[in-house]
Structure formats: structure tokens, C-alpha cells
């Protein structure tokens, strides 16, 4: 049993930073992929994980965003 909840709290904090009112339509797959990228970094992910994340973003439809 973990002696601290800090790692869980960091994960929830990261999720709250990603799931804002502007980004409230993220699918579960997209949110999971973003959390993995933010938490692990590209270098720490396996090739299989990286491929899955790339496929998730390839499937997303293109949106017009005013910058």
C-alpha cells in the first residue's frame, strides 16, 4: 500500500490541466494519450505505446481553429 497519495494527486492535477472548459470534448483515448505523453515523455514510452498514440491523433478530425 502506498504511503503517500502524491503521485495520484499529481495525476489528477495533470488531468485537470488537460480537461479544461476549452478542451472538454476530449475522448477517453485522447485524454489517456495526452496524459501518457505529459507524464512519461516521448523517450520513456515504448514503440507500441507511441504507435497507439500516433494512431489516436491520426483518427482525429481536422478542426478550424482561430489562433
Image (cartoon, rainbow, N blue to C red):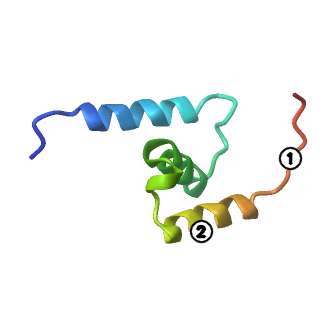
Callout 2: few (<14), some (14-19), or many (20+) C-alpha neighbours within 10 Å?
few
62 is higher (above) or lower (below) than 50: above
Residue pictured at 25% horizontal, 31% vertical: 6
Which corner quadrant of the image does residue 57 belong to?
bottom right
Name the N-terminal-most of marks 2 and 1.
2
Q: Quarter of the image containing the C terminus? A: top right
Q: Nearer the viewer, residue 25 or 6?
A: 6
Q: Quickly name the residue at label 1.
A: 63
Q: Is residue 21 left or right of residue 66?
A: left
Q: Is residue 48 left or right of residue 24?
A: left
Callout 1: few (<14), some (14-19), or many (20+) C-alpha neighbours within 10 Å?
few
In the current view of this chain or complex, which residue is farthest to the bottom? 48
Which corner quadrant of the image does residue 4 belong to?
top left
SS state under label 2: helix
Image mark for residue 51: 2
Q: Nearer the viewer, residue 38 or 9?
A: 38
Instruction: Judge depth for marks 2 and 1 and give the one in front.
Output: 2
Residue pictured at 56% horizontal, 63% vertical: 50
Q: Is residue 57 left or right of residue 35?
A: right
Q: Position of residue 63 (x, y in %)?
A: 86, 46
Q: Position of residue 5 (x, y in %)?
A: 21, 33
54 is higher (above) or lower (below) than 37: below
Q: Position of residue 38 (x, y in %)?
A: 50, 42
Residue pictured at 85% horizontal, 52% vertical: 62
Image mark for residue 5: none
SS state under label 1: loop
In the current view of this chain or complex, which residue is farthest to the front? 43
Amino acid at each position: 500500500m502506498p504511503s503517500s497519495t502524491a503521485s495520484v494527486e499529481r495525476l489528477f492535477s495533470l488531468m485537470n490541466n488537460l480537461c479544461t472548459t476549452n478542451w472538454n470534448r476530449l475522448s477517453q483515448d485522447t485524454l489517456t494519450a495526452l496524459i501518457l505523453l505529459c507524464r512519461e515523455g516521448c523517450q520513456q514510452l515504448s514503440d507500441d505505446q507511441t504507435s497507439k498514440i500516433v494512431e489516436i491523433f491520426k483518427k482525429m478530425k481536422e478542426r478550424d481553429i482561430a489562433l
